[in-house]
Amino acid sequence: MWVHERLGWFVATLGAISASLVAAKIIIARSRLRRLLDVSEPLSEPLQNAFANAAAALGVPMPAVAYLDLGMPVACTIFGPMVLLSRGFAREQARRSLMDWLAPAMAILLAVALFLSHRSFERNLPYLGTHHC
């Protein structure tokens, strides 16, 4: 009976704990992203031009691009809009004989994917908020 009388307090406490854990995870993710951005380098001229051309063709603002000095191939988008590219990705592409056109094409595809994923998220947000929360 004692637990039943205080069930609302238990639920409220668990909700507060859950919300604080989610907030802590978001803060940690943002601090890690800031560290990545601190070690990023400016884009090379061909990649900069490819992103600018893709953004102009799509009629969207140029996304922020973090070019990281990592040996591991990384090419992904982050909500913001932001694109993460690594030197390992560029080196992997450079090993192929078609590097002259492949790297800018991949950059354009990343920019298009970023734009489409952002639009899809905006379109599906009301559904996600009403059906999955």
Image (cartoon, rainbow, N blue to C red):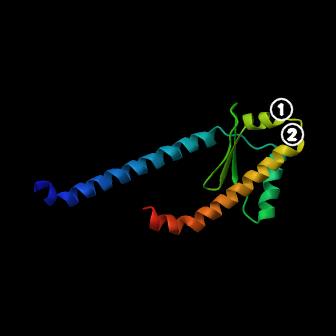
Q: Tell me which amino acid carries mark 1.
A: Arg
- Near mark 2 (Cα within 10 A), the count class, few <14, some 14-19 or many ≥20, is some
Q: What is the secondary structure assignment of the residue under circle 1?
A: loop
Question: On the rendered structure, is 101 left or right of 4?
Answer: right
Q: What is the secondary structure assignment of the residue under circle 2?
A: helix
User: What percent of the width, then of the height, locates residue 28?
Assistant: 48, 43
The residues tagged by marks 1 and 2 sit, at their Cα atoms, a distance apart of 7 Å
Quadrant location of the C terminus?
A: bottom left
Question: On the rendered structure, is 131 left or right of 18?
Answer: right
Q: Nearer the viewer, residue 4 or 50?
A: 4
* Residue 130 picture quarter: bottom left
Residue sitting at 65 percent across and 56 percent down?
A: 81
Residue sitting at 26 percent across and 57 percent down?
A: 11
Q: Is residue 130 above or below residue 92?
A: below
Residue sitting at 84 percent across and 46 percent down?
A: 46
Q: Tell me which amino acid carries mark 2.
A: Met
User: What percent of the width, then of the height, locates residue 124?
Assistant: 56, 66
- Near mark 1 (Cα within 10 A), the count class, few <14, some 14-19 or many ≥20, is few
User: What percent of the width, then of the height, locates residue 119?
Assistant: 64, 64
Of the numbered discs in the image, which one, if any, rests on residue 83? none
Residue sitting at 73 percent across and 54 percent down?
A: 111
Quadrant location of the N terminus?
A: bottom left
Mark 1, residue position: 95
Whether residue 45 is visible:
no
Disc 1 + disc 2, Cβ < 8 Å: yes
* Residue 120 picture quarter: bottom right
Of the numbered discs in the image, which one, if any, rests on residue 99? 2
User: What percent of the width, then of the height, locates residue 115?
Assistant: 69, 60
Q: Residue furthest top?
A: 71
